[in-house]
Image (spheres, helix red, strand yellow):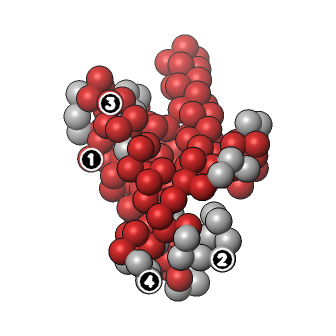
Amino acid sequence: MTAAAWLATAGGATATPGLGALVTALLSLALAGLVLRCPPRGQAAIAAGLLLPAVGLCQLASGAFADKDDARIVADEVLTFPVAVAAQGAARHPAVLGGAYLASRALDGLKPPPARQAEGLPGGVGIVLDDLVTNLYTALLLAGGCAAYRRYRP
């Protein structure tokens, strides 16, 4: 396994059935938690700054597997999740952060437009862009949910 494939698969942990989803969740939540500790502008900059390394890493790792977006590659999910919660103060609450993660994974499974189309792009760009789109949808859902809560709370 190449170094890029090793990194993109969380040290190979994602090859173990059942362990992959847990490792992906823990890494995604830990990274988002670190990003949320920064000032809001810094959060957005860090989330955006993670995208280019994600594309490069996924591009390199995809060469080690027969399937372009092999399920064992989780760098795309982990490195794009901070986009969903960046600059959203409510995401600092563990339940909100966990809910945002679950929404992100559900949307990734549904692949709403243009996520499915983005997935068809070549190499690391396609691998990462579909997750970026689903995390942008997640950010909108989170912002809308928080706005509704503020407006209608008792």
Three-letter residue code for mark 2: Ala
Using the image, determine if residue 9 lies above or below residue 53.
below
Q: Looking at the figure, which quarter contains the N terminus?
A: bottom left
Q: CA distance from mark 3 to mark 1?
A: 13 Å
N-terminal-most mark, 3 or 1: 1
Which callout, 3 or 2, points to the residue nearer the camera?
2
Q: Residue at x 43, y 43 (%)?
A: 51
Which callout, 3 or 4, points to the residue nearer the camera?
4
Q: Is residue 19 visible?
A: yes
Three-letter residue code for mark 4: Met
- Disc number at residue 66? 2
Q: Residue at x 53, y 25 (%)?
A: 143
Identify the residue position indicated by label 4 in the image: 1
Three-letter residue code for mark 1: Leu
Using the image, determine if residue 137 lies above or below residue 59.
above
> Callout 1: few (<14), some (14-19), or many (20+) C-alpha neighbours within 10 Å?
few
Identify the residue position indicated by label 3 in the image: 45
Q: CA distance from mark 2 to mark 4?
A: 13 Å
Which callout, 1 or 4, points to the residue nearer the camera?
4
N-terminal-most mark, 1 or 4: 4
N-terminal-most mark, 2 or 1: 1
Q: CA distance from mark 3 to mark 4?
A: 32 Å
Using the image, determine if residue 68 lies above or below residue 152.
below
Indicate the position of residue 151 as horizontal and vertical percent values: 55, 14
Say left or right for 70 vs 22: right
Identify the residue position indicated by label 1 in the image: 34
Indicate the position of residue 102 as horizontal and vertical percent values: 57, 52
Q: CA distance from mark 2 to mark 1?
A: 33 Å
